[in-house]
Image (spheres, grey):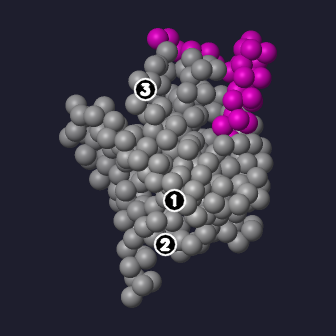
């Protein structure tokens, strides 16, 4: 009976993450770890992070396929950012596994509060096509992409999150590419970071594969529903983002307070 309830909770939690991703285009992965801990009932912070990394990588890969088909992925910039980020994600995952679970939860909760605040800030897209990574721009762009990719990857691996809300500003800030291209290109890194973090945690036996599969299933269902709802509620998208940001901030406060009381 308990196993059945946990299965339902895992699918429902994945559905919440998928719904938010489909509805407002990001931020849902930050809820994966708290949902796995407090709703699904995963007893270990580290197992929750490893399991969420698998789900995040799978969801990002599915979304990446759609963006690539429409030509909204700047592959040279995206791959450079992702490769440097993989190194950061591997290092971050190792640091995360070495940290005490309660302290990791406190930092995670604080990160949620910061990201919730960043979500309500309007995204500024470039007014032109931005810079592309080629022979003439390598001296200017390559160091920036490598540094930004490594830093974002480090945070992604440490906390087991996709990092899309950090990657998109990083790509726009370094290349001035349009927002739609930055979102599509960011999914290359989200997929790569998620796989790197998941691989590191899986090697240490810190991934619950059954729950990861159920979470991904729920995410696919929720994502489909979110896309449908996004078309119907397009005019209220900014309001929905504010509401979701508030949920992220409140959850972050709860996670931090709970960890401090342990």
Q: Is residue 170 magenta?
A: no
Q: Are marks 3 and 2 in contact (CB under 8 Å)?
A: no
Can residue 50 be seen here? The reply is no
Which segment did they paint magenta? 127-153
**Mark 1 or 3, nearer chain start:** 3
**Mark 1 or 2, nearer chain start:** 2
Q: Residues within 10 Å of mark 1 (few under 14, many from 20)?
A: some
Q: Is residue 151 magenta?
A: yes
Mark number displayed over residue 121:
3
Q: Residue at x 60, y 20 (%)?
A: 173
Q: CA distance from mark 1 to mark 2?
A: 15 Å
Q: Residues within 10 Å of mark 3 (few under 14, many from 20)?
A: few
User: What residue did someone put label 1 on?
Assistant: 258
Classify residue 205 as left or right of residue 239. right
Can residue 118 be seen here? The reply is yes
The spot of residue 23 in percent (x, y) is 33, 44
Q: Nearer the viewer, residue 110 or 17?
A: 110
Q: Residue at x 43, y 26 (%)?
A: 121
Q: Which quarter of the figure has residue 51? A: bottom right
Mark number displayed over residue 41:
2
Classify residue 207 as left or right of residue 221. right
The spot of residue 144 in percent (x, y) is 72, 22
């Amino acid at each position: 009976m308990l196993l059945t309830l946990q299965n339902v909770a895992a699918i429902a939690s994945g559905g919440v993450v998928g719904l938010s991703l489909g509805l407002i285009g990001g931020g849902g992965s930050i809820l994966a770890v708290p949902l796995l801990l407090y709703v699904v009932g995963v007893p270990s912070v580290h197992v929750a992070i490893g399991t969420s990394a698998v789900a995040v990588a799978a969801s990002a890969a599915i979304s990446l396929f759609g963006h690539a088909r429409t030509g909204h992925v700047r592959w040279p910039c995206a791959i450079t950012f992702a490769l440097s980020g993989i190194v950061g994600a591997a290092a971050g995952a190792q640091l995360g596994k070495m940290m005490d679970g309660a302290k990791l939860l406190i930092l995670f909760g604080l990160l949620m509060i910061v990201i919730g605040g960043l979500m309500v800030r309007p995204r500024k897209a470039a007014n032109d096509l931005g810079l592309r990574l080629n022979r003439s721009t390598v001296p200017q762009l390559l160091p920036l992409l490598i540094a930004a990719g490594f830093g974002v990857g480090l945070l992604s691996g440490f906390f087991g999150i996709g990092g899309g809300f950090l990657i998109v500003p990083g790509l726009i800030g370094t290349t001035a590419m349009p927002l739609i291209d930055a979102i599509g290109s960011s999914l290359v890194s989200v997929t790569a970071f998620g796989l790197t973090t998941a691989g590191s945690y899986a090697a240490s036996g810190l991934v619950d594969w059954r729950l990861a599969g159920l979470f991904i299933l729920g995410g696919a269902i929720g994502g489909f529903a979110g896309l449908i709802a996004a078309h119907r509620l397009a005019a209220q998208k900014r309001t929905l983002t504010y509401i979701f940001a508030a949920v992220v901030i409140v959850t972050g406060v709860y996670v931090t307070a709970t960890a401090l009381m342990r």
